[in-house]
Image: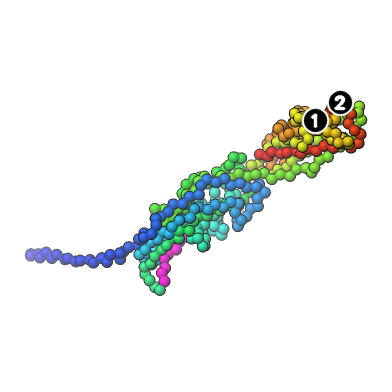
Amino acid sequence: MIRIAIALLSTILISPGALAVCTLARGQPTPLAITSKVITISSDEEINTTKPVAQYDSPAVGSNIGYDDCIENTEYGKRVLNLLGQDPTTRIYQTNISGIGIKLLFSNGSAFGNFPSTSHLRFKNGATTGTLDIPGQSFYRIQFFKTGKLRLQNTTGDAVLPPGLIAYNYLLNDNPANFTTKLTIGEIKIISTPVCTTDNAKTVDFNTVTPTLLSAGVTRNLDFAIVCKSDYGTYSAKASITTDTPSSDGSYIRVEDAAGNKDRLRIRITDGNNRLMKVDGTTFEHKSNITSQGPAEFSWEATLIPGSAATPAGGIFTAKAEIVFDIQ
């Protein structure tokens, strides 16, 4: 049997650029960042998925990012990383804090787009290739919403999200390595401030005071309370007292008698443990671990005593002071 070897030769002509898919021609893929933030929210903030409790923008890209020789139908889009539980209606993702959600947006400088999204290139007049440009004014926006009741732990800040890469825009296929822009965030924390209500203004009436009563001191109750709502489950309240007419050592309130004298009467304030309260705001009584929306109650006493050796003028005497609370 005789065999004949036949060599089959062929030449394939490749037109330069015929297989090119989106060649980077202007600018560079650009990473953007939002630095660490602390969100401050009030404990009476309403649940609302349209009104953010905080909003932060990244810097703009700065200069156009342009791709030439893009083939029709090439895929591009937006994705998030390390976020779960998106509500398809509101586009809000869950965070590490139950009741706080995050929404991401990307702006080309004139309009915003939601995450995630997938699109395909289309060109005018039936062209099969064309250009994709990302404007230099493009930027990312993150918004935080109260989506439910909060139960926080750390009054110095609970971690809503850890630092890291959180979102990217891509070209060709869904892969962070194919990013055109991407967003990194610093750590995001949240602090809640209590909302409180206090008693109305207090009037301590010493009634009619005779010299004999005054020499022994006339004592009246000064009871008051504050009620706070707290996202931490409990709260602490420190109460102090201040006056515009303190004694030189801050231990007494100077009282003005009916003749305008301010050195013949004074008032001493003691707390619930019978400790002298400075009236310059430097001493406190502390109530801790009060259940949210429960009262922190204080039982103080105000004692009217003589001032200088001179007898005060007869008639109505007055003094004013203010209770100051520090809530944590």
State the image quarter where residue 89 is shown: bottom right
State the image quarter where residue 216 is shown: top right
Q: Is residue 292 left or right of residue 1?
A: right
Q: Earlier in the sequence, mark 2 or mark 1?
A: 1
Identify the image's colour scheme: rainbow, by chain, secondary structure or one colour.
rainbow
Q: Report, in whole angstroms, how far the alpha carbon at label 2 lies from the one at label 1.
A: 17 Å
Identify the secondary structure beneath mark 2: loop
Q: Is residue 116 left or right of residue 195?
A: left
Residue placed most toward the observer, 230 or 68: 68
Rendering coords of residue 218 (x, y %): 86, 30
Rendering coords of residue 323 (x, y %): 75, 38
Quarter of the rendering occupied by the N terminus = bottom left
Q: Mark 2 against mark 1, which lies toward the viewer?
A: 2
Rendering coords of residue 239 (x, y %): 72, 36
Quarter of the rendering occupied by the C terminus = top right
- Magenta range is 117-124
Rendering coords of residue 313 (x, y %): 90, 33
Q: Is residue 2 left or right of residue 218?
A: left
How many residues crowd around disc 2 within 10 Å: few (fewer than 14), some, or many (20 or more)? few
Question: What type is the residue that disc 2 sits on?
Answer: Ala
Which residue does the image show at 30% across and 64% down from the upper left?
Answer: 17
> Does residue 284 lie above or below 87 as drawn?
above
Decide if residue 272 is in sight here: no
Decide if residue 191 is in sight here: yes
**Residue placed under numbered mark 2 in the picture:** 309
Which residue does the image show at 44% across and 60% down from the upper left?
Answer: 134
Which residue does the image show at 55% across and 43% down from the upper left?
Answer: 159
**Residue placed under numbered mark 1 in the picture:** 268
